[in-house]
Each structure stands twice: as structure tokens, then as C-alpha cells.
Image: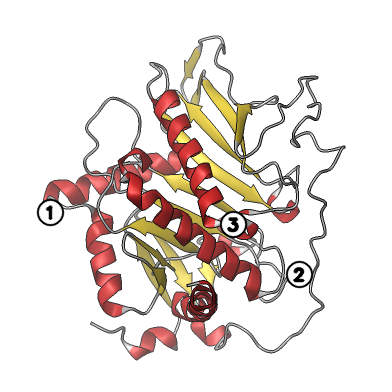
Amino acid sequence: MKLNSDIHNYSHKRFNPLTGEWVLVSPHRSKRPWQGQKENTLIDDRPAYDDSCYLCAGNKRANGEINPDYKDVFVFTNDFSALQPDSKPFKIDDGLIKAESETGICRVVCFSPDHSKSLAQMNVKDIGKVIEAWQQEFRVLGKMEDIQYVQIFENKGAVMGCSNPHPHGQIWSQSSLPNEILKKDRRQLEYFKKHRRTLLSDYLRQELQLKERIVFENRAFVVLVPFWAVWPYETMIVPKTPQKNILEIPVEETILYAEAISVLTKSYDKLFNTSFPYSSGIHQSPTDGNNNEHWHWHMGFYPPLLRSATVKKFMVGYELFASPQRDITPEMAAGTLKHLADNLYNMTS
């Protein structure tokens, strides 16, 4: 069923079935995703090697260790980890004052020895090597007795708080489930118990029928703007076949996952002719030893840019104190990104 036309003209709220939360949409405030402002292209002119970079091959890191002369992906334990594996156990439970210790391991994943390349500038084969590194880390960390969840993510760009421009992401593993995972675990389990199907497999079926928010798809993966998206050009990559975590990706489909990441990140860079900032992360099943058959893993991209390479969306005012809100509808955003993705894919295929 196509959306009622009123949804494109009047304020309304949309429901996120993965979290149980709502987002306010105000389409009347912005009828078009782009209103003609032009800016000079922001050139991200970085060398392939920077002798002052802590992450480049052969360089000394802040803790004094020397990076190996790595040729593709390099993974190491974060020198300034947010979680400590040997944190002293404690618990405070005094009325409304509650706290308890949290342990974990944090890793850094350098995508490439080339200081100048983001995922958007890497070839599909090399992105595949990054995915294989994610899988290996998930496998090793997830088997550890005290690790209940493994969060893979990337902060790209200074505007997202990235402290080093070298292409890299992070993996935080911890002894309990973080807030977003608790919400998604609960909602997916409720849906699976009721329908005996994953929530995202049914959602994906609807989206593929409607084709209103699809940005790109190949044989194994779909890139779309979620119906409940909060950020202006937020997207999600979802495997067409229900899979609990990235270890269940068939070997021959890893390259298709890499292709989806490549097309999306290249489209982002073309949108405002800039190295597009974002936070991305993979939400997948906990590593708590349970079956977790209700989980359907997915990768979200949350970019802050709104109207141009320099105009970003801020979560302030109503959004901080009440609820997220957006003007550009997910359908508008998807149409813009799909046009870019189609052009890029046709040029390379």
C-alpha cells in the first residue's frame, strides 16, 4: 500500500518498531531536499602517508608502540580504551543511587595503510578485507566469557568527533548490553515470538514492494532510508536473508556487502561534493550464549549534514527535551541518494 499523500504534506510522527520510539516529521517545512545553494567543493587533500599520524604504518603511537608496516587492514587494542578488561568489580545500590562496574576490550581497526583513503575511496575488494577483519574480531571477542556484546562502529570526520583523519573504525566489547541493544533485543524478541519471523525480514519485504525508500540493492543486501529515520540522510544496510550477526554472511556474499558499503559511501560523498561525515555502526546479536534467533543484523549510517557541506543538523531544543524531529522526509532523502547511487553504479558496472 502506497503512503497516504497527507504524510508528505502535514506534520505527523513515525514509529520505529526496532526501538519502540517515535520521530516527529514536518514535511511542510521543507518541500525539497535541496534548494539550490552552491558552495565551493571542500577538498580533502591528504597525503598517502603522514609522518605525524599515530595510525600510519611504521609510525610510533601515543603509547610509544611502533605500528607494523601493514599492507591492508591493521587491528590493535585501543591505547586509550573506554572500557578496561581488569576494572575492579563493585556495585552501589543505595536507593536511587545505583552504579556497577563494567569491563570490556576496545579495538581500533585501520582500514588501509593509505592515509588519504576513506571507505568511499577504497575499492570493493579492500572493503571486503575490512569486513573480514570485523568478522574475525567479532568471533574472537564474542567467545570471551565476560563479553556479552560487541559493537563495531566508525566515526568519520572531525564534525563527528573523529580525533584522527586516518581511515579507521573501532570495536568496543563489553560485559553487559548497552541501551540501544537492550531496546532492539526486546522489540525483536517480542515480534519473533508472535510471528516466528524476524522483524526486519517483514519490514524489508514491505520496503521492497513499495520501493519508496530504497537507495540500492544487489542480490544479498538492501540499502534504504528507514521509514522512521531521524537524521536527514540516515540509511541502513540490511541483509535480505535473516542473519543474527555478520558471521552468518555466506563467504560469497561478503563482496556484495562490501559493494553496498561502497555504493552508499560514494553516493554520500557526491551529495554535497565533500568527504561526507557520519557515524556508522553494526547492530547484531549479543554474544551471551543464547540462541538469539530473533535478531536480524543491520548497519546504520547517521550523517549530520542537512543542506550543504557546511550546514548540519543539530539535536537541540525540542529534540533534546522532547523527541527527534526532521523536515526532509525519508522519501525525499531516499530519492536524492538513489539518483546518485544509480549513476555511480551504472558508471562502474
Residue 177 placement (x, y as % from top left): 41, 32
For the residue pair 184 and 59, the one nearer the viewer reads as: 59
The label on residue 310 is 2
Q: Is residue 163 left or right of residue 278?
A: right
User: Label 1 crowding class (10 Å Cα cut-off): few <14, some 14-19, many 20+?
Assistant: few
- Secondary element under disc 2, as helix, strand or loop, is loop
Q: Nearer the viewer, mark 1 or mark 3?
A: 1
Residue 75 quadrant? top right
Q: Nearer the viewer, mark 3 or mark 2?
A: 2
Residue 113 visible (yes or no): yes
Q: Quadrant of the N terminus?
A: bottom left
Residue ID at (75%, 47%): 115
Residue ID at (24%, 36%): 292
Residue 159 placement (x, y as % from top left): 73, 55
For the residue pair 138 and 212, the one nearer the viewer reads as: 138
| Residue labelled with disc 3 | 320
| Residue labelled with disc 1 | 195
Q: CA distance from mark 1 to mark 3?
A: 35 Å
Mark with earlier residue (3, 2): 2
Specify the amino acid type for callout 2. Thr
User: Label 3 crowding class (10 Å Cα cut-off): few <14, some 14-19, many 20+?
Assistant: few
Specify the amino acid type for callout 1. His
Q: Is residue 321 above or below residue 14?
A: above
